[in-house]
Amino acid sequence: MTTSPSESTTALPGRPPVVDLATWQATRDELLVREKAHTREGDAIAAARRRLPMVELDGTIEVIGADGPVPFLDLFQGHDELVVYKHMWHDGAPHQGQCEGCTLAAWHMKDAVYLHARGVSFAFLTTGSWEEVSSYVEFMGYTQPWYSVRGVPEPIGGDMGYVACFLRDGDRVFLTYSTTGRGFEVMTPSLGLLDMTPYGRREGWQDYPEGWPAVPQAGSPVGGHGAPICWYWRTDVHGNATWGPTGRPVPQWTRPGVTPEETLGRSGDCH
């Protein structure tokens, strides 16, 4: 059921204009043309991605997981394909001091059953020492396999904050694809859903109509004013966006027994 627009509802501040259903459908159909073109271009890019060359690497290189050192080849779990997320790490930092953006990605990837159904394995890699990593994984309640690649060279180790894809042919292993930055937003469907809403992600870099609510700010409640912040990375116990020492990556507030802390415990940049 819809209502007809009236004088009092056609110009609500900070909100889309109110129109009748037929007008809405016409403008929606115009946008659909662009959305379909975007989808087709995405399909074309994926087709080109499948045609990229690949680089052979040493699959016997050992990484450290819950069962101790294992060859990288074991991460395929008998499958022909492997996707990994390379999680940044702050050495010596407590749980609340670990990487916010990587927490965002990892929290969305709790189950790889649909990847397994297509013969694709999944794992997290990080440069943290296994002693620190195992404690963090237990605290977060992650069930996907994690491995420390400390000291392991590229492309298995090296720079973190990437999604990478590998192919196996018997005992031979190949790197086929790698992406970083907004390239791994595919792992964070919450952002895609927010892009469909009227207010979107509410980040300072996005294009918003004049008069839209302010983006969440550092040290103030959602909708406050100040320096723009990626709100979903870190909040305090009250849900306020913050980079302060009492903040945590958002999912950590759901963990049993979690409490506010006084420090991030960071001694340097992510590795």
Image (cartoon, helix red, strand yellow):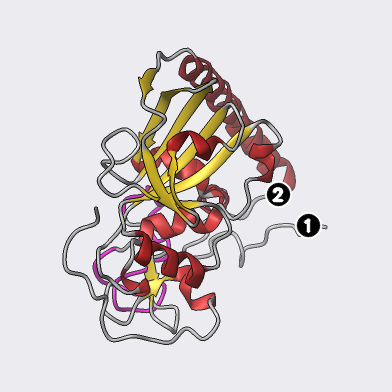
Query: What is the quadrant of the N terminus in the image?
Result: bottom right
Choose top left, top right, bottom left or bottom right for residue 121: top right
Question: Could you say which is closer to the camera, residue 183 or residue 57?
Answer: 57
Q: Distance between the residues labelled 1 and 2?
A: 8 Å
Is the stretch drawn in magenta largely helix, strand or loop?
A: loop
Q: Which of marks 1 and 2 is nearer the N terminus?
A: 1
Choose top left, top right, bottom left or bottom right for residue 130: bottom left
Q: Mark 2 and mark 1 in contact (Cβ < 8 Å)? A: yes
Mark 1 or mark 2, which is nearer to you?
1
Is residue 16 in sight in this rendering? Answer: no
Mark 2 lies on a secondary structure that is loop
Residue ID for mark 1: 2
Q: Where is residue 268 in the image (x, y as percent from the top left)?
A: 16, 63
Residue ID for mark 2: 20
Magenta region, residue range: 205-228
Magenta stretch contains residue 53? no
Query: Residue at image x 47%, y 64%?
Result: 137
Choose top left, top right, bottom left or bottom right for residue 249: bottom left
Q: Is residue 31 above or below residue 169?
A: below
Query: Residue at image x 40%, y 32%?
Result: 60
Q: How many labels does the image show?
A: 2
Amino acid at dot 2: Asp
Question: Could you say which is closer to the camera, residue 257 or residue 73?
Answer: 73
Query: Residue at image x 46%, y 31%?
Result: 165
